[in-house]
Amino acid sequence: ALRGLVSYTVPKVDVLVSATLRSQTPLALTANWNVPNLVVQTLLGRLPAGAVPTGTTTVTITDPDHRVFAENRRTVLDMRFAKIVRFGRTRTDIGVDLSNLLNTNYATSYESQYEYSVGNTANGGTWSQPTGVFSPRFVRLNFTLHF
């Protein structure tokens, strides 16, 4: 992950400008497949240790050494613009914060359960579908009093 913050006050007009940049590696997808023990018994010729015929066995079907990634790198840019107003020994920043300026909408979590069906007719079910999405772009007014 890469993070950076830059801030600058424009001297003559007393305006504060700042930016925050976050760049993160993509999420790695995992897949867990709950296979009925009767199918496992048919394939192995025996039940897994401690398993019952009516249960299921969880099989991880993604390779942990060669990970499957969901997306490209995720980059988020936030900006802030604030006018500095001074009253004696106090200072007030009146500003606007722009979050997620690039309006990225990448997924923050994914379904990890791969659905079992005879002949794989379900094609994995809902596996790898996003279950959470990054917050959309928004604007916030900000008043900060320094005393």
Image (cartoon, grey):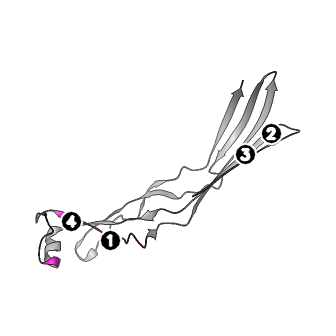
Mark 4, residue position: 57
Q: In the image shown, does 16 or 134 lie closer to the viewer?
A: 16
Mark 1, residue position: 61
Q: Amino acid at mark 2?
A: Val
Spatial CA span between label 3 and label 4: 52 Å
Residue 88 image-quadrant placement:
top right
Residue 49 image-quadrant placement:
bottom left
SS at mark 3 in the image = strand
Q: Amino acid at mark 4?
A: Thr
Spatial CA span between label 3 and label 2: 10 Å
Mark 2, residue position: 15
Query: Would residue 119 be counted in the magenta stretch?
Result: no
Q: Are marks 4 and 2 in contact (CB under 8 Å)?
A: no
- In the image, which residues are magenta? 44-66
Spatial CA span between label 1 and label 4: 12 Å
- Mark 4 burial class by Cα count in 10 Å: few <14, some 14-19, many 20+: some
Instruction: Specify which label sits upstream in the sequence, 4 or 2.
Output: 2
